Amino acid sequence: MELDLTKPSKKAGASPGTLAHVGRRRMDDIRINIITYGEQHLVEKRCIAIGACKAFLEGPGVAWFSVTGIHDAGHIEDIGDLFHLHPLVLEDVMQSEQRPKMEEFDGYIFVVLKMLFFDKEKAGVRVEQVSLILGPGYVLSFQESEDDVFEPLRERIRMGKGRIRNMGSDYLAYAIMDSIVDHYFVILEEMGEAVEALEEAIVSDPKTKTMHAIQKLKRQLISFRRAVWPLREAISSLQQVAEPLISRDLSAFLRDLHDHTIQVLDTEETFHNTISEALDLYMSSLSKRMSQVAQVLTMVATIFIPLTFIAGVYGMNFKYMPELAHRWGYPACLLLMLAVAVGMLLYFRRKHWF
């Protein structure tokens, strides 16, 4: 799995709220895109300046501020000043290895969750952290790279499909989270195909590389679970938030989102059990193959024991030995050895030892 493992030790000793990027820098410039909409209007702007966000923040309807790139502490601090965000929130935004969670502040809600992508070339899962700020009339999202799973959601907003243009910012935050959770099923589908391929390889021809593939997929499933498991608790906490930030109309949608998260975890657990059973099957297949090899070697050794005895007896250099001067002694000895070998093979076959 391709994880953005970093060294958070560079923040050790710093005071709480100190802004320092922890993660792999994926963009050179921070970009802010905006979609603001209502039932009768839609405005979409790309790559705007931080100062221009204020006009959209104070405008009518719902505004979605999408920030790509979290490595520049100065820019993040300016955004925090504009939206009146707590320094600890900004600190968590810049740390890309945060645990999924939900925290309620005065006037807004802070949510962290993981967006996952399956890399077919590397046969691994890439993790992208998404931080959401839900405030009155706006949603502010942070992520490191431009890759996301939100294009169908943006298209729904542009086309006015569904109820999103008639709902508030809390529904937009729910829709963003729902897009991420729905994409988990795509990742699980890819993993499911990998699990089935490994099971077939184990049954047909288990090799050392099969063992390595099992271990790699097992690590991916563990990392997947680590990225998704805390989200269930975060969504449960989100259901407890009172109005006006979360309306009562959203309760049914949040329950459905919670159910989807549980379904994802159940599916992951099934795959985890399957891959553990596949590992046991691989070890059993390997043990069976070793047993078969040992059985063949044992039968060969058993057959050659009497043959070696006969050859040893007739190989002794005594002057007076029976059959030494007999004309047919040598072929008779060979025929005796052949008869012994064939007889033992027939006996082994009758006993179903091979």
Image (tube, grey):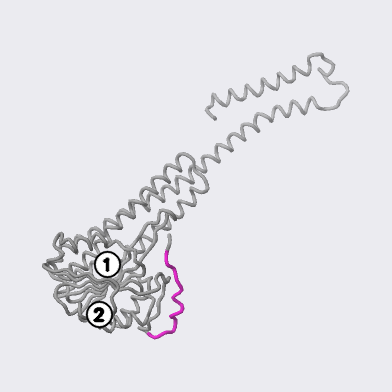
The residue labelled by disc 2 is 52
Instruction: Find out whether residue 292 is within the magenta segment.
Output: no
x then y, percent, for residue 120: 40, 53
Say whether residue 265 is visible: no
Residue at image coords 74%, 25%: 310
Mark 1 Cα within 10 Å, few/some/many (few <14, many 20+)?
A: some
Badge 1 marks a residue whose secondary structure is helix
Camera-side residue of 239 and 75: 75
Q: CA distance from mark 2 to mark 1?
A: 36 Å
Crowd class of label 2 (few under 14; some 14 to 19; many from 20; radius 10 Å):
few
Percent across and percent down for residue 39 are 11, 67
- Where residue 217 sits, quadrant-wise, is bottom left
Q: Does any portion of residue 348 appear in the rendered image?
A: yes
State which tag comes first along the sequence, 2 or 1: 2
Is 203 or 194 nearer to us in this picture?
Answer: 194
**Amino acid, disc 2:** Ala
Looking at the image, residue 346 sits to the left or right of residue 65; the answer is: right
Extent of the magenta region: 3-15
Residue under label 1: 233
Residue 6 falls within the magenta-colored stretch: yes
Q: Quadrant of residue 303?
A: top right
SS assignment at label 2: helix
Quarter occupied by the N terminus: bottom left
Q: Quadrant of residue 346?
A: top right
The image position of residue 13, as x and y in percent, is 44, 84
Q: Amino acid at mark 1?
A: Glu
The quadrant in which the C terminus is found is: top right
Residue farthest toward the top in the current orientation of the protein: 327
